Amino acid sequence: MGSTLATLYGLALCLEELGPQNAEQATGIYQRIIELDPSSPIGNESKKAVSRLAQDTMKSKADGGLRMDAVMYMTGAFETFAKMEQQEVAKTVFEIAKLGESGLSINNPDKRYTLKSLEGDFSGLQLVSIMHVGLKTINPSLDTQSGLDAEYDAARKMAGK
């Protein structure tokens, strides 16, 4: 299986190098590698690539402005976390991070996810937004590397934090 993973990884890298129009296809291949062998070195590199591509996509979608959907998700997260103990916030953040290990589809609002710690179903962007607020609630100086710092600042002001 090692040579298959290496071939898939090479294909994904090539697609990534061809430009942002191929990011979705490259992400799909990286996610397939993660499904096949998540703890291998290629699986770990694929996880990093999925995260990198998600950040790049997030930044390019913003076009220099704010992603208002993320701002609204974060504003809701501030309200939700205000009712929770810090240990509950940490549990939710950990659950989202664990779910995100195999990649969250942040640009497809139709793809939905559920959590044990929060009621409802959530889009990938919504989960990343909730996780960003949760991490900043736990440690305000933390760099979440989500590409949503400007959205977080706007949501924080809207929530009066």
Image (cartoon, rainbow, N blue to C red):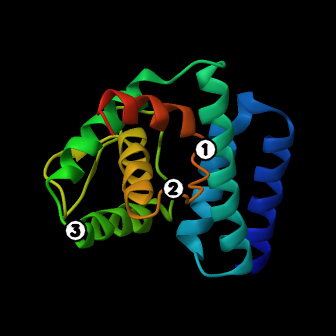
Q: Residue 84 in the image: x percent, y percent?
A: 17, 60
Residue 88: which numbered mark, if any?
A: 3
Q: Residue 148 in the image: x percent, y percent?
A: 54, 39
- Amino acid, disc 1: Ala
Nearest-to-viewer mark from 1 and 2: 1
Is mark 1 in CB contact (under 8 Å) with mark 2?
yes
- Give the residue pinned by disc 1: 54
Q: Earlier in the sequence, mark 1 or mark 2?
A: 1
Is mark 3 in CB contact (under 8 Å) with mark 2?
no
- Amino acid, disc 3: Glu
Whether residue 123 is visible, yes or no, is yes
Q: Earlier in the sequence, mark 1 or mark 3?
A: 1
Q: Is residue 86 left or right of residue 52?
A: left
Q: Quadrant location of the N terminus?
A: bottom right
- Amino acid, disc 2: Gly
Alpha carbon separation for disc pair 1 and 3:
26 Å
For label 1, the crowd category at 10 Å Cα-Cα, with few meaning under 14, some 14 to 19 and many 20 or more, is many
